[in-house]
Image (cartoon, helix red, strand yellow):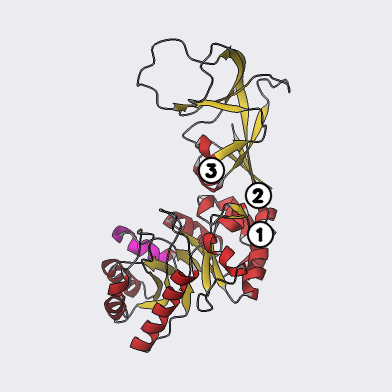
Amino acid sequence: MSELTINSQIIKANILKLSKYLKRHNIEWSLIVKILGGHREVLSAILDEEVLGGIHSIGDSRILSLKTIKSINPDIRTMFIKPTAINQTENVVRYADISLNTSLDTIEALNKEAKKLGKVHEIIIMIEMGELREGVLRENIINFYNNVFNMQNIEVIGIGTNLGCMYGIQPTYDKLIQLSMLRDIIEVKFGRKIRIVSGGSSITLPLISKRLMPAGCNHLRIGEAAFMGTSPFNGKKFKDLSEEAFEFKSFIIEMKKKDVLPDGIIGEGNIGHTNDAISETRDKIYKAIMDFGLIDVDVKNIEPKKKNLTFVGTSSDMTVYGMEKNEDGLKVGDYIKFKPDYTGVARLMTSKFVLKNII
């Protein structure tokens, strides 16, 4: 069985470094834990008193994950970070103290559920700033806020935007200053205080050190930097964070020297994919068959730590890597280590067929 090792101490150290760094710049932040797939043991290992003391809230895009977090510690402030499906409004109000929203119909449903449960549900209204995913159009903002301010069991605590997730639109000073100015307009128009201007995710972090973060932008939603040590702004390590929190290893279930190319009529019945760059010769190479497949993780999201390995092909539950020479004498029962990226970790964490080793 393949294994994913999760170093909780490295993750906690990254979180504490981020808290210290952001506090110096007067920015609050929410730790986004969706990469962990709601894994109870990992969440319990990370979300201790020291970590929670430096962050605004814990966010996830899955209700079941927030339910798990509340069962670990009901006092943890939780945030649901995507627009709510109408049939999930009751669960969102139960397990999320805050939610991000873009639809009046949804907020009205949240208001009704909050009234039933005797709660006031906090929301951040997300604004469309160019990414063309979720967000209220800027020309509709005044009417939108006017409607929401009339809901008795909804408290608007912030305005926010999402950038970099679908088209990869990068956050800029101009975009974030526009967001801050929209907050100012709403406050003047309605005489209401909007505490939070949430300027994005880990992709926004590099703007801080470049002094391109507007002063009014006072909140970020960070996952990748805390867990992977990197910012998707440039894919590089951020500050002194560690990139070594996760390691994937898979065991060799067959090792043989075989032809490079298959023999026979190739049809359309395969469900996997192969490496078209493999040399079109009949030369043989050593092929190591690993005990993971597409069900567990996409090979695009993991990199073997042995540099002499070349991806050959993958199917639902097995993956093949090749090498010209088996210099290390690899055999059945040995394992190969891989470095997963953010998406790779997220896939591996949700696979029940991958053992989780927490250290």
For residue 335, the mark is: none
* Magenta region includes residue 228: no
Above or below: residue 235 compared with residue 195: above
Q: List x then y, in percent, for residue 196.
A: 47, 76
Q: List x then y, in percent, for residue 128.
A: 36, 66
Above or below: residue 12 compared with residue 126: above
Above or below: residue 307 compared with residue 29: above
In front: 319, or 204?
204
Q: Which residue is mark 2?
A: 245
Name the residue type under label 3: Gly
| Snapshot quadrant of residue 341 | top right
Q: List x then y, in percent, for residue 200.
A: 48, 65
Q: Which residue is mark 3?
A: 344
Q: Do residues under tags 2 and 1 come within 8 Å of each other at their CB atoms?
A: yes
Name the residue type under label 2: Ala
Q: Residues within 10 Å of mark 3 (few under 14, many from 20)?
A: many
Can see residue 319?
no
Query: Dot 2: what SS?
Result: loop
Query: Dot 3: what SS?
Result: helix
Q: Which residue is mark 1?
A: 14
Query: Dot 1: what SS?
Result: helix
| CA distance separating discs 3 and 2 | 13 Å
Q: Residues within 10 Å of mark 2 (few under 14, many from 20)?
A: many
User: What main secondary structure does the magenta stretch of the protein show?
Assistant: helix
* 45 with respect to 260 (left or right): right
In front: 252, or 224?
224
- Residue beneath the point at 53% across and 64% down: 204
| CA distance separating discs 1 and 3 | 19 Å
Above or below: residue 34 compared with residue 302: below
